[in-house]
Image (cartoon, helix red, strand yellow):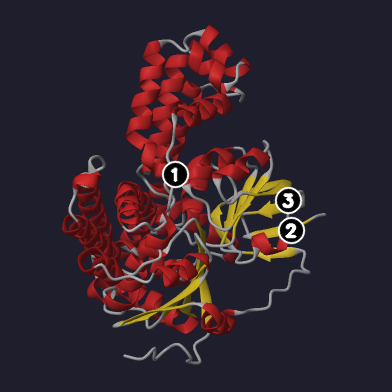
């Protein structure tokens, strides 16, 4: 089949810009989007286009295509009682299937596995991970790119008489999750360790005055054991999405940040639990005041839970990707290839290499530097060289950087002012100081420590169910999401004012 939609009039729209992503990971969901996504929604995407520069991915939808896919989902959420609830339930089920299989992926003695066994592991993981996306992408598709669900819910509020001045505040209250995300739970578990530490003034002083190495050397065994159990439970959650693993030092640094603040861990925990309960009560009260129709009330509730299930499925996914890392490295070793080359192969090419000893090392070297992937139903094609450059010209869009305001959606209401710090990955966090405004393409779990120090958060990408929106609400930090151009317009050191009540970022100097 030919690439039918490659040159249609529906312009390419940037879906996401993801550092540290590869073809191995992304083809599972990209292939799903154009082939299998219709399974539970009734409509798949017509086309997907991606550019890879090493481990950096940009992927594009057709602008109108993405809007139609999103609106189709929203129409079903509004028109079919229980559909939103079904989505959330199945996200949990699919995430559990994926993490369940990931636990069976061998991590030791890989050199004793046959090539057939390596292919079986690779294929099974891909199959489960692809199926996972048929449910797990639905909330993202419904809102991230054209705010279809957000706009529909806000329009409903207008129809029942909510004023434009109150729309945003009411929307945030009504979509507030009533349960804790795994990020929230993980942080509370670390705070619980901090609560044990705060009982000993000497230990608190240790965290305040010594470097990481000194803290580790002087910590009593019971505290070290608690931290090691915490690490053993969550080490993989730094694997976003190619490499990464949390070590003991990372958690020591997080506790040092906590103890350098004005609020001790036990008070932070009490404040968090109180705020969660207050948010529940505010939500219930507002539902009564607005006399929400039961159908719409349930949609608001499930939309809020999309934020929780989004993080739940992300942890399962990262765990699977972490455990597949050793398998990919073993495959690379068998054929004297680099890990990056193997990570830039399509599944059928891995099968050919493992079972028929057929592969093109030169082609893989080109791909690992730069390549373009195109997919539609029944088509997966990779382009390199001049052909790839020519295709990517279709995605070029001029951006006016000579502006003094940016507009986006509200992740968490409030306002903040400070110096811009562009934070993309954990290695950027050293720039972050208390009160700075964190600006990112899209936040991820590995930069949560920097998010905690921010007076406000601004992202280019993401809807209400994005990581930035979820974490900013849990932290109570003003956040504007989906500005599309924040990292292209803003630079480190700029002074900005973030009005997250209106979704506006103003450059002051």
Residue density around tag 1, few if under 14, some if 14–19, many if 20 or more, within 10 Å: some
Between marks 3 and 2 in the image, the one whose residue lies nearer the viewer? 3
Question: Residues under labels 1 and 2: Cα distance?
Answer: 35 Å
Q: Quadrant of residue 246?
A: top left
Residue 146 in the image: state x and y as whole percent.
Answer: 49, 73
Residue at 72% from the left image edge and 58% from the top image edge: 490
**Helix, strand or loop at mark 2:** strand
Residue that numbered label 1 is attached to: 244
Q: Quadrant of residue 332?
A: bottom left
Between marks 1 and 2 in the image, the one whose residue lies nearer the viewer? 1
Question: Residues under labels 1 and 3: Cα distance?
Answer: 25 Å
Residue 260 in the image: state x and y as whole percent.
Answer: 61, 23
Residue that numbered label 3 is attached to: 492
**Helix, strand or loop at mark 1:** loop
- Describe residue 12's horizontal placement relative to residue 379 as left or right: right
- Label pair 1/3, CB-CB below 8 angstroms: no
Please tell me which of labels 1 and 3 falls first in the chain. 1
Residue at 59% from the left image edge and 62% from the top image edge: 460
Residue at the farthest right position:
509
Residue 25 in the image: state x and y as whole percent.
Answer: 37, 61
The N terminus sits in image quarter: bottom left
Question: Residues under labels 3 and 2: Cα distance?
Answer: 15 Å
Residue that numbered label 2 is attached to: 506
Residue 291 visible in the picture: yes
Q: Nearer the viewer, residue 71 or 113?
A: 113
Please tell me which of labels 1 and 2 falls first in the chain. 1
């Amino acid at each position: 089949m030919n690439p039918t939609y490659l040159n249609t009039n529906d312009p390419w729209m940037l879906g996401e810009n993801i550092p540290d992503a590869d073809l191995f990971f992304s083809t599972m969901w990209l292939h799903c989007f154009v082939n299998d996504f219709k399974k539970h929604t009734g409509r798949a995407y017509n086309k997907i286009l991606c550019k890879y520069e090493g481990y950096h991915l940009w992927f594009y939808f057709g602008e109108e295509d993405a809007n139609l896919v999103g609106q189709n989902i929203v129409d079903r959420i509004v028109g079919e009682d229980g559909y939103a609830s079904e989505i959330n339930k199945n996200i949990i089920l699919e995430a559990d299937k994926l993490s369940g299989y990931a636990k069976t992926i061998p991590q030791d003695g890989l050199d004793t596995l046959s090539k057939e066994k390596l292919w079986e592991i690779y294929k099974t993981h891909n199959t489960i991970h692809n199926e996972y996306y048929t449910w797990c992408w639905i909330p993202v598709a419904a809102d991230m790119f054209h705010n279809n669900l957000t706009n529909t819910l806000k329009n409903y509020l207008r129809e029942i008489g909510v004023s434009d001045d109150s729309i945003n505040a009411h929307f945030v209250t009504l979509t507030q999750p009533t349960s804790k995300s795994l990020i929230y739970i993980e942080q509370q578990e670390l705070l619980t360790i901090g609560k044990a530490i705060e009982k000993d003034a000497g230990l608190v002083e240790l965290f305040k005055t010594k470097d990481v190495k000194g803290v580790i050397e002087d910590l009593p065994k019971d505290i070290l054991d608690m931290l090691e159990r915490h690490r053993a439970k969550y080490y993989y959650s730094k694997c976003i999405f190619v490499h990464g693993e949390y070590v003991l030092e990372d958690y020591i640094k997080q506790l040092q940040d906590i103890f350098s603040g004005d609020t001790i861990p036990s008070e932070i925990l009490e404040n968090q639990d109180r705020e969660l309960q207050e948010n529940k009560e505010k939500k219930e009260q507002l539902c009564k005041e607005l006399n929400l129709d039961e159908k719409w009330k349930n949609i608001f509730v499930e939309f809020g839970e999309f934020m929780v299930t989004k993080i739940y499925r992300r942890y399962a996914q990262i765990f699977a990707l972490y455990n597949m890392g050793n398998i990919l490295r073993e495959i690379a070793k068998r054929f004297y290839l680099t890990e990056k080359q193997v990570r830039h192969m399509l599944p059928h090419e891995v099968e050919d290499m493992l079972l028929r000893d057929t592969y093109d090392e030169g082609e893989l070297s080109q791909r690992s530097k730069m390549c373009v992937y195109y997919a539609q139903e029944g088509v997966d094609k990779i382009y390199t060289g001049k052909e790839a450059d020519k295709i990517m010209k279709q995605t070029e869009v001029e951006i006016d950087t000579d502006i003094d305001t940016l507009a986006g959606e509200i992740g968490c209401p409030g306002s903040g002012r400070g110096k811009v710090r562009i934070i993309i990955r954990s290695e950027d966090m050293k720039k972050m100081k208390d009160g700075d405004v964190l600006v990112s393409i899209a936040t991820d779990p590995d930069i949560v420590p920097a998010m905690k120090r921010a007076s406000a958060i601004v992202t280019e990408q993401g809807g209400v169910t994005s990581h930035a929106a979820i974490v900013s609400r849990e932290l109570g930090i003003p956040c504007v999401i989906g500005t599309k151009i924040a990292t292209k317009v803003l630079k480190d050191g700029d002074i900005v004012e973030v009005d997250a009540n209106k979704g506006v970022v103003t450059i002051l100097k």
